[in-house]
Amino acid sequence: RVTMIIVGRLANVLFLWMCILGSSKGAKLAKECMFDLQQSTVVGYGDLMSFPGLWNGEGSTVLSMDRDSGNILLYPQMLPNADFYNSFTNTTVTIGKDKEIFMFYDQNGVHKWSATAYGSTFPVVEKDVYILNEHKVTKLAQENGAELWVTPLCTDYKVSGVKKVNDIFPVVHADSDSELAVGMLITGPGKCAIMLGNQRVELISDVPDTHTQSTPFIIYLSKATGQVLQYTKYEAVQADLIRTALRTKDEVIFMGMIIAEPTKTVQHITKHDKDGKTIWMTTISTPHPHNYVWSQSHVDDENDHVLFITDPTESVEINKKSYKHRGLLFGGIDIATGVMAWKKAIEYKGIITSTFIQYMDTDLFVIGVIWDGEEDLDLGSVKLRQLKRPVRGMMGFLGVYSRKSDNFLFVQEVAPELVYPGHHIAFLKLNDGRYEIVTAPAFCDENPMKMIDNTHSVAMSKPEEDAIVLVRYEYRACHGSSGSSTPGRDGRGG
């Protein structure tokens, strides 16, 4: 957890300026199209951890959602020994070495409980809550956050010289309700131990001593007891970080990155069979670094393509084939073959950064983007016009894209905090073509009013401290092939 470059601590102040300029007129929404703010609640204040790639230099909140119930877990990642004020319980918790705060909400954003545990990656919410770190898994009860069991994981880790710790990551285990699948990545040569029943078993990575080759494992635990049931070792991957994986039937797809690469941004996506053998691998590389700690790729068990997004300044290389482009480029990789099935290019000469891509439904997905607003941004069916303003700053948007119509259906302009860092966005399919979009932005400036989007703000009772806000939107899918965007106070729209 390292502090990286600061690009604009006053981004929220600048966004406020952007939103108050101009007239109140804007574009009308398409027929039956809806994007309504349901909730914007300050959940707490405290000194947040700084992470690589965060453009304002600080502020990280992990959000996990139960994809069946819509229950929400927030994990504010705090500085050591920092105080966190919980707005719901009106209490302050001091963060310790093995003590962090986790906050549980129902689908409607109602706070149910807060508890302390220790995590280091995205928690898993599958009815109950599972907190993951490099050394153990902790289960908390859905009803009240009570600790149900703790299972040691990867003990006696032997340092390879490449990394001081192994990486732990969640695995979407689509075909089991009784087992929890936990991924583990050992970069370079190394090993650690797990207890398989009463037997101590060593998990060994025997790849060369490099910064790019790693051995992934998946460990299966009983959700009822926490006992380790089995594990699978997979062939080496060209990645030093895996953020998530999908297991369906007997196959696994890992979505990784090479963080140690100093001159490129490299995504490495691989598919393996039940015996751990590699079926295919796809590498997406852009010749400029951004050092993000989240992977800009996504897969689920309802779609046939792995989504990826990148923001090349000159070109992007996909499986060693180069494409000249400047702006955004996203597409789909065929799950069966690993071959790029389709791609979409958005030209933009200014500063633009893709922050995430994620499925919302079958052939329907959302991208998160931050851009400078210095020129018109033509998204095809939707155009975001250049913003004339007396100050400089970045802005963000959520873009809903239909693969079926090959077009953006809707674009919502939001504060840049809402689409950073990409791992605190969640989606829930409701009914009647409605979806819930949930995010937990961290605001780190001292403005007492934080802008959520072009028309909504939230007041801060402690403006001098970092604040975390739970934001819930409801989106109704637009009909027809033409896209639309929400009107802004500056008179822009699609």
Image: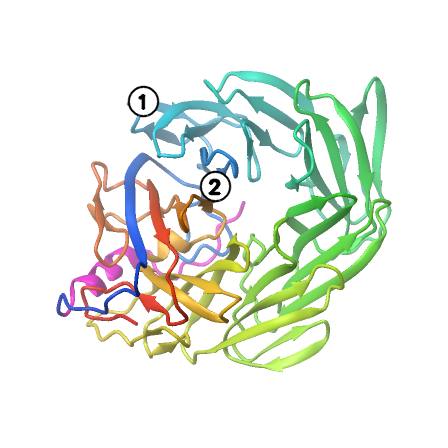
Residue topped by disc 2: 62
Identified by mark 2, the residue type is: Val
Q: Is residue 19 magenta?
A: yes
Give the percent coordinates (x, y) of residue 227. Answer: 73, 21
Q: Which stretch appears magenta? A: 1-22
Write the residue at 79% across / 23% down: 195
Q: Residues within 10 Å of mark 1 (few under 14, many from 20)?
A: few
Would residue 356 be visible to someone looking at this image?
A: no
Write the residue at 79% across / 51% down: 272
In this picture, residue 454 sits left or right of residue 397 = left
In the depicted view, which residue is nearer to us: 144 or 93?
144
Figure quadrant of residue 85? top left
Residue topped by disc 1: 89
Total tally of numbered discs in the picture:
2
Real-space CA distance between mark 1 and mark 2, rounded to the nearest whole angstrom: 20 Å
Give the percent coordinates (x, y) of residue 198. Answer: 83, 17
Q: Residue furthest bottom?
A: 324
Write the residue at 31% across / 22% down: 89
Disc 1 element:
loop
In the depicted view, which residue is nearer to us: 72 or 61?
72
